[in-house]
Image (tube, rainbow, N blue to C red):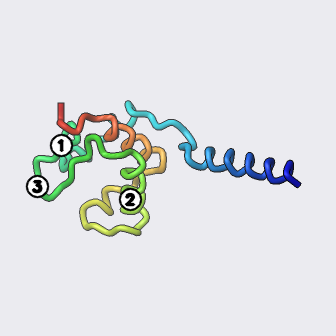
């Protein structure tokens, strides 16, 4: 019985580890090449010059993924962001998120 319980714990820990890892590694360079449209509002280095638009530089990658997908999927509505995110694939979103997460939040 103890052996079965130990095996179940091992499986649960392994599954938890797999679920917490991204399915693929995002491509920062691809995200940068896709970011030109984003830069109009969020700045070239992810620092917005427009007070009502957030800075993206240095944001947590998973947070950005979740928010952009929410705009794309209609779970979060915004008259500017929803149409901007509508054409993005999961790969595009992962790459953009990795790119913005890699930037210095001080804008340097």
Query: At 24% across and 62% down in the image, what residue appears?
Result: 80
Where disc 3 sits, the SS reads loop
Q: Position of residue 58 (x, y in %)?
A: 28, 41
| Numbered label tally | 3
| Identity of the residue furthest to the right in this view | 1
Q: Is residue 26 above or below residue 93?
A: above
Q: Quadrant of the C terminus?
A: top left
Single out the mark in the foreground, 1 or 2.
1
Q: Are marks 3 and 2 in contact (CB under 8 Å)?
A: no
Residue, disc 3: 51
What is the CA distance from the residue labelled 1 to the residue labelled 2? 23 Å
Q: Are marks 1 and 2 in contact (CB under 8 Å)?
A: no
Query: At 51% across and 36% down in the image, what residue appears?
Result: 25
Along the horizontal axis of the image, is 16 left or right of 34?
right
Single out the mark in the foreground, 3 or 2.
3
Q: Callout 2 environment at 10 Å: few (<14), some (14 to 19), or many (20+)?
A: some
Mark positioned earlier in the residue sequence (3 or 2) = 3
């Amino acid at each position: 019985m103890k052996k079965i319980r130990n095996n179940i714990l091992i499986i649960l820990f392994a599954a938890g580890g797999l679920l917490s890892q991204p399915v693929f590694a995002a491509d920062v360079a691809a995200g940068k090449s896709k970011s030109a449209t984003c830069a109009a509002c969020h700045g070239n280095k992810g620092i917005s010059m427009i007070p009502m638009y957030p800075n993206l530089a240095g944001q947590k990658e998973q947070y950005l993924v979740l928010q952009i997908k929410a705009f794309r999927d209609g779970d979060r509505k915004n008259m500017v962001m929803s149409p901007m995110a509508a054409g993005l694939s999961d790969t595009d979103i992962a790459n953009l998120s990795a790119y913005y997460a890699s930037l210095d939040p001080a804008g340097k």
